[in-house]
Structure formats: C-alpha cells, structure tokens
Image: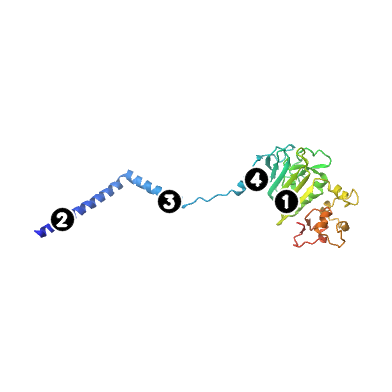
Amino acid sequence: MKKKMNYLVLLLTFIFMVGCTNVEDTATTDKESDPKVAATENSDIKSEKEEVSVDAVEEPEVEETSTRANEEEFAGYDILEVDGGDLSGTRQPNVVADIGFGERVYWAFTNEYGQLVRVIAEEITLQDDSTETVTSSGRYYSDEAKVTGVESDVLDEGHVIADSLGGVSNAYNITPQDSTLNRHGDQAYMEKSIRDAGGATNFEAIITYPDTETQIPSSYKYTYTLMGNEIVDTFDNVNPDEVNESLGLTGDKDSKSKSASSFTNEGDQDLSSVDTNGNGQVTIAEAKAAGYSMPITSDHWLYKYMQDNDNDGMVGE
C-alpha cells in the first residue's frame, strides 16, 4: 500500500511540472504571436538603447572664439556696411565698419561724435595687383572720401590703412592728414615698413582729436607686429619738415624731412646733427631726439651707425 502511494505522489508531481512548462511556453508563444505586445517590448528596448546612447556620447563644446571676441569688441556699436568707394565724407556715430578690401577684415570704430578713433586688424594682407583690380596709380578706387577738412591745401585724404595694405577709401578709413606726413613722413614710413615685411599682424591704430567738433586728428598711435617684433609708432598730425626746422635740424626750408630720407638711397646725411657726442655711433635716444621714428631699418642711412643687437635688420623695434 505504501509503495502504491509513492507511485501516486510521483505521478502527480510529474503532471504538475508538465503543466507549468506548458503554461510558460503558452505565455511565451502568446507574446511572440501578439504583434502589439512584441512591438511594445521592442519599443521599450529601443528607447532604453537610445537613452544609453545619448548619455554615453557627449556633444562637443563648439567654441566660436572669433565670434565671441567680436561680440565683446563690438559691444555698444552698430555694425555698418559701407561701400569701399563711397566718397561721402560723413560717418555715423558709435558704429563699426569693415574697411578691408575684398576678403580682408579690418574694423574701424567711430565714437559718439562720428570721429574715426580706432582701426584694428588681426592680419594686414598686402595689395596684390596680379589678382585684384587696381588703377594705374596702384589704388582700388579713383578717389577718396571727402571727410571734412580734406579741402585744405595742406591736408591729404589720408588712409589709416593704405591701398597698398588692402584698405578701402570710404570715410571709415580716411582722415585729413598733413600732406608731408602722409607722403614722406612717419605715416609713409610705417606703410613702407609693413610692405617690406610682407604684411603685419595685431594691427591697431588709435586716433586722437583736439576736440569733439573737428574731423582733423591731432595725433596717431600705431601698434603692430613685424617679424615677431611689436612696433609702437606715435606721431602728431603736423608737417615734419616744419617741426625739424623749428628744432634746427634742417639746413633750409627746401630740405627733405628726416623721415623722408629713409625712403631713398641718397647717401649719408649730416651725421653730426644726430651723433651729438661725436663718437661715430648713434644711439636710439640720439636718433629719436633728432626727429627719427623707430624702428630704423637696414635701408635707412642711419642703420650702419647704430647697433642691431639681434641682427634682424631693425633697431629700436
């Protein structure tokens, strides 16, 4: 009897196990056969994968450095588009305008009085007459903007950034500048230095006025980098010949300015007027006292009398 009972228990256990297995198989089969259930589960799995993927891949931080720098630089100014050859002499106040010809980007700023007070350029790119259309005189335009003051017989329509350096000719790049200064003085010397170096970087011009009414500057300060050397050139908007004469540095009224002498190979000038101690050597201080602007380059007549410690072709940079 006991033996029969054991068989019965085993039989019932077997039946129960078979029944559970069938239930599980049926449930699984039902899920697989029900497209709604399968789709829901697949959707849940896909969502989980997408969440993991989004979390795992971090979006790179895009830094628009130049744009951000421009926004900070231009705070408080309106950006104005002006044709490069616009001859109108008027400027709008508190604006910034691109005065670079073609693809160049040179920025000019005005103050609340419409005076041109600052010009900046990350890189000065020289004019290329092999790819750019220029006049026979080497200019992009046949004339320059008529800023108030240029009607004077002694003032030029002076470019802050010259045609040869890629500047346009509208009022945001023109100031009334002393003719001798513009053609033969410090302004011309600065432009030649940049051309000779094949361009410049980190260019900035600060333009100062005697009052808020005039458009004729009283002085200029140029800062730029040539061949790794930072140059700072400051000069007044005056005739350098008259200044040199008042300082007793010229023999007569017809003498060329000392700044102009750096553009020719006319031979030595009067060394004694610069070499104040008569030792045959000229120091930077002596050259500046004689009215010469720095740097003195290797094509300048004074260069051979000065000490170029780093042998880079410039003294006083």
Q: Amino acid at mark 2?
A: Leu
Graded by Cα atoms within 10 Å as few (under 14), some (14 to 19) or many (20 or more), the crowding at tag 3 reads few
SS of the residue at dot 2?
helix
Residue underneath mark 2: 11
| Spot occupied by residue 165 in the image (x, y as percentages of width and height) | 73, 48
How far is disc 2 from disc 4 in space, using C-alphas? 91 Å
Q: Mark 4 — residue? A: 73
In the rendered structure, which disc, 2 or 4, sits on the residue that comes first in sequence?
2
Report the amino acid beneath label 3: Val
Which numbered marker is on residue 52? 3
Q: Taking 302 as reference, is 96 above or below it?
A: above
- Mark closer to the chain start, 3 or 2: 2
Q: Nearer the viewer, mark 2 or mark 4?
A: 4
Image quarter in which the C terminus is found? bottom right
Q: Amino acid at mark 4?
A: Glu
What separation in Å lies between label 4 and label 1 (alpha carbons)?
17 Å
Secondary element at image label 3: helix
Count of residue discs: 4
Say whether disc 1 or disc 2 marks the residue closer to the N-terminus: 2
In depth, the one of 78 and 141 nearer the eye is 78
User: Marks 4 and 3: CB-CB under 8 Å?
Assistant: no
Q: Is residue 296 visible?
A: yes
Q: Which residue is mark 1?
A: 223
Q: Position of residue 229 (x, y in %)?
A: 72, 56
For the residue marked with disc 1, what is the amino acid? Thr
Specify few, some or many for label 1: CA neighbours under 10 Å numbering under 14, 14-19, or 20 or more. some
Q: In the figure, 125 relative to 170: above or below?
A: below
